[in-house]
Image (tube, helix red, strand yellow):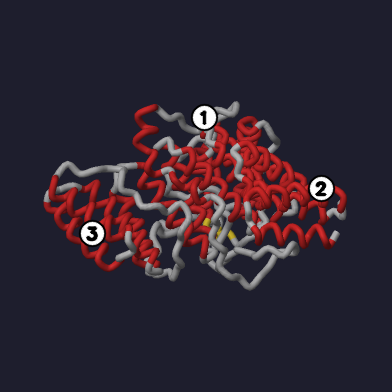
Amino acid sequence: MYNTIYPAYVRPYSIGVNNKQISKKTEDEEKSSQSSQNAENNYEQEKPRSNTTSYFPNGEKVAIDYTKRKINIEQVLTDFKNTANAIGAPDEIKNEVSSYLTLVQNQALKDRPNQQIIQSNLKNASQILDEYITGALKKPSKVVENWVDALFLQHIEYKIPQKEEKIEEKTAENNNQPQITEENEPQNDFYIPSDTELKRLFIQAKKYAAINEEEKALQAFEKAMNYADSIGDEELCAIIHFEEGLLFDSKNEINKALESYHNAASQSKDNNIKAKAHMNMAKIYDDYVRFEPAFNHYCAAVSYSGESDNLKLQSIALSDLAQIHTERYDKPNAIMFMNLSDIVANETNDKKVCAYISSKNGKNCERINENYKAVKYYGNAAKIYYDIEDSENLAKRYEAAADIMLKYNNRAKAKKLLSKAFVAAANADDSNLKKEIADKIASL
């Protein structure tokens, strides 16, 4: 398994340059998407990661899930082309890249491909994309070139096979995956059926789900599904698939949950549902450290949330992409996705979203030993939490920054930050947090 930048089947999203937002909301669209946007209420309640047996030098768990599968050059070409789409490259850039990729493909179709020619053209194409990314982010980037260099260190079959190979299945019905809870709120306001009986059946099923009567809810959803199918309401069928996915998640029946989310994403015409379904599938794979499918579905969530102008979900998905790269200790990609998540979060004009993304980026920076960046992110989050009077999270950000100061043996700065954290914890009336911070102060 190799570090793909963009999955082959995901629709492209645009980075945009000069700090322009990835997508703009109209007033009507904003109203229609509000029901799917309550993830910010659960931002600080992150689910613990699944157990792994390897650790980075800094103590963080390693999430790499390499397989022994060989890489074929055709797979690389597919990902490379979609990378140009993924970063929103203009046509002139994509055409220039395509010219090099065509040379690669022509060489790979020969009986005995010239490895040096293929590598040289891939490097040229990567440099073109990195120049564009550098301009978009206003910061030097070698993300694509680093990716290509990493590929050259692995086993690549430079001849394109006679039959097309599949890089990754879009679904994974046979993988054992755990339940997810983040950003997983019930979705009952995407679409309301006009048929009175169908509406009644759907609402009844939702009520059972709301009181955790999973079996009754599933039976009720099945009735609603059959009725919706009989009258040709395909959109509600897709929504019911999503709702069933949530219920299967709650029952820890992960194979069924994946199947339901996949059906919802495939059948729905609502990009919000597609984004949420892909986000939930990504979380499942992420929890079981399946990097490649998690990466693919996070990218899909970024794409569809951009198309539906759901900037909150888009920023969260980007920060999750940063996290799975930090867990592989892939600094260039991690930093790139952190920068993007920060840009999009700022475009939401939602302080809770901005604070959450800054906090998560701070933690991600710690994982890759970018401690100076981590302190800046924690500081930004602390300012926002102070403004919105969220004392508990303010205390946690001060404490996190203090822990970094202790790594550098700056006890005076650490004590100052811990003192601020203690005051904030007291204001939040959190006795456990107060004790934890007090113990740290006493140890200095």
Instruction: Identify the image quadrant of residue 328.
Output: bottom right
- Residue type, numbered disc 2: Lys
Q: How many angstroms separate mark 1 from mark 2 (CA)? A: 49 Å
Corner quadrant of residue 38: top left
Q: Residues within 10 Å of mark 3 (few under 14, many from 20)?
A: many
Give 151 or 39, whichever is nearer the viewer. 39
- Please state which amino acid type lies under the numbered disc 1: Pro
Q: Position of residue 147 (x, y in %)?
A: 63, 50
Q: Secondary structure at mark 3?
A: helix
Marks 3 and 2 close (CB-CB < 8 Å): no
For the point 20% across and 44% down, the residue is 193
Residue 240 in the image: state x and y as whole percent: 27, 54
Q: How many marks?
A: 3
For residue 416, which numbered disc appears in the image? 2
Residue 221's tag is 3
Q: In this rendering, does residue 255 appear at all?
A: yes
